Image (cartoon, coloured by chain):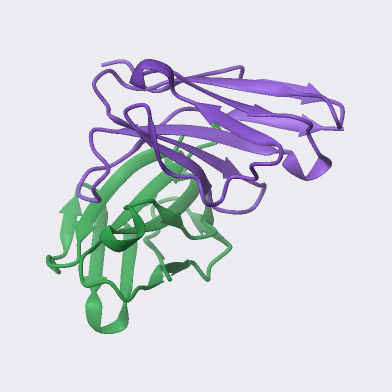
Chain colours: A green, B purple
Amino acid sequence: AQKVTQAQTEISVVEKEDVTLDCVYETRDTTYYLFWYKQPPSGELVFLIRRNSFDEQNEISGRYSWNFQKSTSSFNFTITASQVVDSAVYFCALSAVNTGNQFYFGTGTSLTVIP
Amino acid sequence: EAGVAQSPRYKIIEKRQSVAFWCNPISGHATLYWYQQILGQGPKLLIQFQNNGVVDDSQLPKDRFSAERLKGVDSTLKIQPAKLEDSAVYLCASSLWPTGDTEAFFGQGTRLTVV
């Protein structure tokens, strides 16, 4: 079975602080994909990043960076120098070939950036 | 490129009534998903289509929920009769193909309130 755990329910930071959102996953598949989505108050899920299980390279995109560690089954997301516009709910998700590639989402982390 | 379109954005109905949601995916996307997102939770897959065929509907409450994707493009999701616990946001998503190495694009969702 596939499972994604986001232990942090809510996080508040002051603008310009760095913040890391944790994601731990469980799967028995050897081929799987990990995703992060952002859900602003408008409700639409916005794709941020996709990683496959064979690529453990960390990635940086502007103020966003992702740390994928298979040894700890984690795929953490860091926002550097946070901004008010980063306030949203962030979801980590997993998909695997053996379960039809449907997305299994975590429960989300609500991030509030205080000006 | 136009995104995933959903309508209506909001719907309030009484329990035991019926309701229908509509989704128009991104042009050329063969895979279409319907997700249910209960407040405070991550989205949960209800049904997945590949073109106009059903790939996975194992979590669709078939005694009250139905979905179709005519001609492999637009899709409708129906609930009849609705229960209080159906109050949620219903998200439609589409992707180029069903494998995990592509992201899904989500619509803004339909917020259903059953009273």
Q: Can you say whether A50 is above or below A31 in the image?
A: above
Asked if one can make out residue B7 in the rendered structure from this viewpoint, the answer is yes
Q: Can you say whether A2 is above or below A94 in the image?
A: below
- Residue B78: name its quadrant: top right
Q: Residue at x 41, y 33 (%)?
A: B93
Q: Nearer the viewer, residue A42 or B95?
A: B95
The total of numbered circles placed on residues is 0
Asked whether, in this view, residue A104 is left or right of residue A65, the answer is right
Q: Quadrant of the N terminus of chain B?
A: top left
Q: Residue at x 87, y 27 (%)?
A: B14
Asked whether, in this view, residue B100 is left or right of residue A79, the answer is left
Q: Nearer the viewer, residue A44 or A65?
A: A44
Q: Position of residue A43 (x, y in %)?
A: 54, 34
Q: Residue at x 65, y 47 (%)?
A: B38
Residue occupying the far bottom of the picture: A71
Q: Position of residue B26 (x, y in %)?
A: 32, 21
Q: Nearer the viewer, residue B89 or A77?
A: B89
Q: Position of residue B46 (x, y in %)?
A: 53, 44
Q: Residue at x 74, y 29 (%)?
A: B80
Q: Position of residue A97 (x, y in %)?
A: 26, 59
Q: Quadrant of the C terminus of chain B?
A: top right
Asked whether, in this view, residue A83 is left or right of residue A75, the answer is right
Asked if one can make out residue A83 in the rendered structure from this viewpoint, the answer is no
